[in-house]
């Protein structure tokens, strides 16, 4: 017997493309004759019963092109407690939701696992700009975020070249360095610092690169730093003091989360949303939807959570040769 009602929520940090994913879940479900309930503000809205019926495909009209999430999102501390998870599980059952689709990052996956242990049917879709979910090679929002970061780096390059400065740019990524690595390569960074490579966060090594640039007549340098590494102001101060070249720090911050999603984000989001509904319709639950080796697959949720991700060695090694 196929499911009667599917629920959908977005959780954790918002990511461009989440709306396209919500739209895909809603439209694919309605197409298959499955009822849809949307939960507002992630797990917080679930616990407080902020749930709305969606019986019209037009509810998700005109959102494929919009950043953020129309369902809003939240970080919900209560969900991390056993009592909170039970309250959330009760809310799912009370709402008559047969399967809950969670679009979010690693933390959201952990919340979903707690729900599944409490008897809720869950499916997870990777929605985070950070690309830090080990089970998948793609997370919704990443391409838009790195494109935004690259655009900002391009602009900083213009001004640092004109003023012969060192630009130290902090990009997002929480505890992961993927945005820094990708935006750094795309923006032509001289130094890329990531939390996964603490040995690179060495002021002597960084100044060495800046000084070598100076020796070959390049009076500007670009240092891209993942937010999990440390203070960009401090790095800029140290570089200026030690090299004598003016250094400025810039924190890109939340602007990396906004903006209209790229085609890649919209297509991955649409595919993963549609696939989640198909999996639910096959009565398969506690699964994480992944993109791997050019294909969409699904794996056991707990297995997905227990996987660890590392920076691709080839990509890292090549990035070092590009400066
Ligand atoms: P992003 O990294 O893109 O911000 P995320 O999903 O990892 O996304 P988090 O804030 O870590 O963002 O998690 C989102 C929500 O998931 C938390 O606010 C909390 O409600 C729930 N959550 C996180 N960790 C756990 C956990 N260990 N157990 C239960 N719920 C959790």
Image: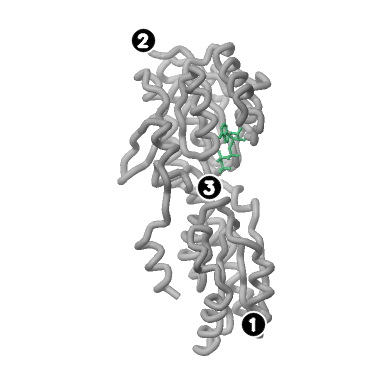
- Residue neighbourhood size for the residue with mark 3, other residues' Cα within 10 Å, grouped as few (<14), some (14–19), many (≥20): many
Task: Name the disc covering residue 129, or none.
Answer: 3
Residue 316 position (above or below residue 55)? below
Judged from the image, the secondary structure of the residue bearing numbered disc 2 is: loop
Q: Residue at x 55, y 72 (%)?
A: 202
Queried on whether the Cβ of the residue with tag 2 lies below 8 angstroms from ligand 1, the answer reads no
Disc 2: which residue:
1
Disc 1 or 3, which lies upstream in sequence?
A: 3
Measuring from the top left, give residue 257's x and y in whole percent.
Answer: 60, 48
Q: Label 2, label 1: how many angstroms apart (C-alpha)?
A: 69 Å
Q: Residue at x 63, y 79 (%)?
A: 165
Quadrant of residue 63 in the image? Answer: top right
Q: Label 3, label 2: how many angstroms apart (C-alpha)?
A: 36 Å
Judged from the image, the secondary structure of the residue bearing numbered disc 1 is: helix
Q: Are marks 3 and 2 in contact (CB under 8 Å)?
A: no
Residue 84 position (above or below residue 306)? above
Measuring from the top left, give residue 286's x and y in whole percent.
Answer: 42, 26
Asked whether, in this view, residue 254 is left or right of residue 288, the answer is right
Give whichever of 211, 188 is nearer the camera: 211
Disc 3 or 2, which lies upstream in sequence?
A: 2
Judged from the image, the secondary structure of the residue bearing numbered disc 3 is: loop
Q: Label 1, label 3: how many angstroms apart (C-alpha)?
A: 34 Å
Queried on whether the Cβ of the residue with tag 3 lies below 8 angstroms from ligand 1, the answer reads yes
Q: Residue at x 65, y 55 (%)?
A: 253
- Residue neighbourhood size for the residue with mark 1, other residues' Cα within 10 Å, grouped as few (<14), some (14–19), many (≥20): some
Measuring from the top left, give residue 139's x and y in whole percent.
Answer: 46, 44
């Amino acid at each position: 017997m196929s499911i009667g009602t599917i629920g959908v929520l977005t959780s954790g940090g918002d990511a461009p493309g989440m709306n396209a994913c919500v739209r895909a879940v809603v439209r694919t479900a309605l197409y298959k004759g499955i009822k849809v309930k949307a939960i507002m503000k992630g797990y917080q809205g679930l616990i407080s019963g902020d749930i709305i019926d969606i019986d019209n495909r037009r509810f998700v009209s005109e959102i494929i092109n919009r950043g953020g999430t129309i369902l809003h999102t939240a970080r919900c501390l209560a969900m991390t407690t056993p009592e909170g998870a039970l309250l959330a599980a009760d809310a799912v059952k009370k709402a008559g939701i047969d399967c809950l689709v969670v679009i979010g990052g690693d933390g959201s996956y952990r919340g979903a696992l707690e729900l599944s242990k409490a008897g809720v049917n869950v499916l997870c879709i990777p929605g985070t700009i950070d690309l830090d979910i080990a089970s998948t090679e793609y997370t919704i929002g990443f391409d838009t975020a790195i494109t935004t970061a690259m655009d900002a780096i391009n602009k900083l390059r213009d001004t640092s070249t004109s003023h012969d400065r060192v630009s130290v740019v902090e990009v997002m990524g929480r505890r992961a360095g993927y945005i820094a690595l990708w935006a750094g390569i795309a923006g032509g960074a001289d130094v890329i610092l990531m939390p996964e490579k603490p040995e690179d966060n060495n002021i002597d090594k960084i100044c060495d690169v800046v000084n070598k640039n100076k020796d070959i007549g390049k009076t500007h340098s670009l240092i891209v730093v993942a937010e999990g590494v440390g203070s960009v102001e401090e790095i800029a101060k140290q570089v200026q003091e030690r090299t004598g070249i003016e250094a400025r720090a810039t924190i890109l911050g939340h602007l990396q989360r906004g903006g209209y999603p790229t085609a890649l984000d919209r297509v991955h989001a649409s595919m993963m949303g549609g696939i989640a509904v198909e999996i639910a319709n096959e009565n398969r639950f506690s699964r994480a939807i992944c993109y791997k080796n050019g294909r969409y697959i699904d794996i056991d949720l707990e297995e997905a959570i227990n996987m660890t991700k590392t920076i691709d060695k080839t990509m890292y090694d090549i990035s070092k040769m590009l400066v």
